[in-house]
Amino acid sequence: MITHPCYATEPWCLRETELSLEVLAQSESVFALANGHIGWRGNLDEGEPHGLPGAYLNGVHETHPLPYAEAGYGYPESGQTAINVTDGKIIRLLVDDHPYDLRYGELAAHERVLDLRTGVLLRTAEWASPAGRTVRITSRRLVSFTQRAVAAVEYVVEPLNGPATVALQSELVANEQLPHTSGDPRVSAVIDVPLRSEEHFAQDTRLRLVHRTGHSGQRIAASADHLVEGPEHTTWTSESEPDVSRLTVTASLSPGRRLRLVKFVAYGWSGERSLPALRDQADGAVAAAHSTGWDGLLAEQRAYLDHFWSGADVEVEGDAQIQLAVRFALFHVLQAAARAEGRSIPAKGLTGTGYDGHAFWDTESYVLPVLTHTAPHAVAPALRWRHATLPAAIERARQLGLAGAAFPWRTISGAECSAYWPAGTAAFHVNADIADAVVRYVTATGDEDFARGPGLELLVHTARLWHSLGHRDARGVFHIDGVTGPDEYSAIARDNLYTNLMARKNLLAAADAALRHPDQARELGVDHEEAASWQDAASRVAVPYNDTLGVHEQSAGYTSLQHWDFDATAPEQYPLLLHFPYFDLYRKQVVKQADLVLALLTCPDAFTAEQKARDFAYYEQLTVHDSSLSACWHAVLAAETGHLRLAWAYTGEAALMDLENLEHNTRDGLHIASLAGTWIALVLGFGGMRPYVDEDGAHGCLAFAPRLPRPLTRLAFTVLVRGRRLRVEIRNATARYTLLEGEPLGLQHHSEPLTVTTAEPVERPVPAPPRRPEPRQPAGRGPADRLAGSDVHG
């Protein structure tokens, strides 16, 4: 979209200079505002035209039966789908009885700006009604980071070419008509009208609706209050009915006079609390917002984001698109998680209902690595949500005949929602991804209360799963059979390398945590014998390797499979899953997304530098990147192995996934993991940042191996670690490390130990990358070369 004529590229804002209905649905996603608790899509204030109306509350969903041609033991029975809740952002406008609709009259000007520093969506428009009366409309919208339950809109109307009678209709609307997105009529029937009215109210400038879902039993309250500023004789009335509560404000305006409406909206929801309790909660939040006032909310929002950017900003010199993209990405990652507080981080955040609003493993493997070093306050709540779902995961493991906990592949509430078990239940690696996120967070923050509490419990139950899922052969080698790794074009494999190595990390981390917290471990039933059995299994984990090819195998026997015929695959046949049966994909060497390549980065100690280079080259020629989760990790490993031009191309693909609608589904919501991958590609790729343990066994240290691709003249970023704020500035020949805040910090620069203090920065030269033959990609599947405008090799 940022190459669309309607969009401008600026370092700190996304600007749409005219309204284009052809990208309206995509723009609603990229202009979405959220705080991890509330999400408002970037719909026009007046509600229409729209692509997909959307107001979301994290965790609010409806259940529906999952379709099976044949039922089987252990199949999940119910699906969960995020629903559009009461929409509080609608403010309709009538000018001399003509409804303001951009499809009628004449739109002389229209601009929207998402300001990444203030967290405000600004919209300005000039419109002539069919009768020729011209008005200027200005609106500003925010979803508060500081007042979790609150969102607000300022809406201003001014006539330009003569007097006009103006009416504003500010509404709370439930059960908005939505486009059908499901082919299953049972799901559509549930989602079409998901909310049942329990109360409606309108009095003076106050509005309220209370509804309850029909099947999941969740109650939602939405309240609104208003400030009205207009000329003398401005009047208003309010009314309500089961699905609409409305304030109508009317004023006669002459040029130079304006009507201003400030709308404060608050939400509350629960599956357990009573109607009066939810009503009071929403009304109380609205009253607090009203007391703060519009200017106060703006000031709080700016202060919150100033603090965030001081520890998160990434500066890119040499590519204006990527500069905008990485800030856009960080802003939306923050919006997905900042105030989730005990809820999941969905794959689309709160920007749309793609993937049914489910959370997947990419929360722990993509989003939390970024937040751990930029907004660590949001990480523990995300992991506490996983901990809160532990009873469901333990029950799921029992159902599968396993010990420990089996966390779901996709979920909202904690119950498994995947109806396709080979790519769902069999993807047990989600357990290890959660454990890895626990260790990463504790290492980077030193949060010992979390470590000895929820962290230990998560590590213990995930380790027990691996110990019961795996088995030893006659030689004592520990195998994990019948699992699906990150690559969704392979399934039910033996010894998936990523799964095995991550399980090994999980087992060792659990044993170590049990030794460090023996009292708490005993409360969980962990004794010395069990911890020792985890260590023994970890030491014997199978690591598939093909001696003839000199590469690791994605799973046992993978390199003996038939190669996919890429030359016979037409460009329009990608993504492959839409044009070929899984039966064919599963038995060929073709990779949907980073799998073994991801293992090279998450388990670096298992590989030598030369093995990484050979493995990357081998799997690069098999990977078609039919997933938004793939490009960022290939960027990181390409950078590590010296292929900087290729790494830069993959960085562009991750960064522009939504801004350029590369997967053609941005209309359903943003790809939060790919957005997080923009930071991953820049900081872990070209910054070369990795955790390490120093000679004295100290955790929380960081190693860097920076190198820049040719178009970049400078890359600078700030990371948070153990209460310290570290700034890294990389140029083509040098890297500078500046400790902005905190106690002295041990680092490595290209394996050289350093210590930085707040007294002065440390600068070191950047060595040249190793020279290796360029890896190749399947025909037509290479990333777009950002230097030449074509595919790299592909």
Image (spheres, rainbow, N blue to C red):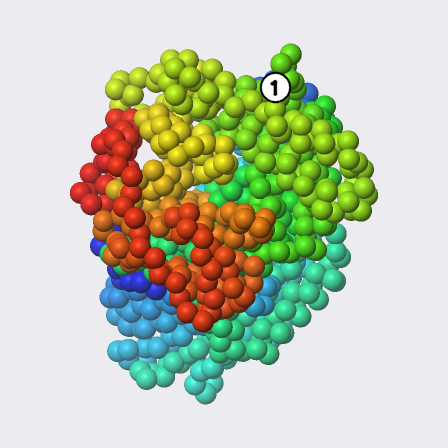
- Comparing 278 with 546, the one in front is 546
**Tag 1's secondary structure?**
loop
| Residue 441: x %, y % from top left | 58, 51
Q: Amino acid at mark 1?
A: Val
Circle 1 sits on which residue? 477
- Nearest to the observer: residue 539 or residue 600: 539
Instruction: Name the residue furthest left.
Output: 788
Q: Is residue 78 above or below residue 6?
A: above
Q: Position of residue 457 (x, y in %)?
A: 72, 43
**Residue 95 visible in the snapshot:** no
Report the residue at 23% width, 41% height from top.
Answer: 785
Q: Nearer the viewer, residue 666 or 718?
A: 718
- Measuring from the top left, give residue 177's x and y in whole percent: 49, 48
Say which residue appears at 51% left-offset and 47% top-offset. Answer: 692
Q: Is residue 238 left or right of residue 759?
A: right
Quarter of the view holding residue 163: bottom left
Q: Quadrant of the C terminus?
A: top left
Q: Is residue 166 left or right of residue 211?
A: left
Residue 451 position within the rendered picture, expressed as x and y whole percent measured from the top left:
68, 50
Determine crowd level at label 1: few under 14, some 14-19, many 20+ residues with C-alpha closer than 10 A: some
In the image, 431 versus 302, the foreground residue is 431
Residue at left offset 23%, top offset 36%: 791
34 with respect to 285 (left or right): left
Q: Give the tally of numbered discs.
A: 1
Camera sees residue 509: yes
Question: Is 437 placed above or below 780 here?
Answer: below
Name the residue: 20% across, 38% down: 790
Q: Quadrant of residue 246?
A: bottom right
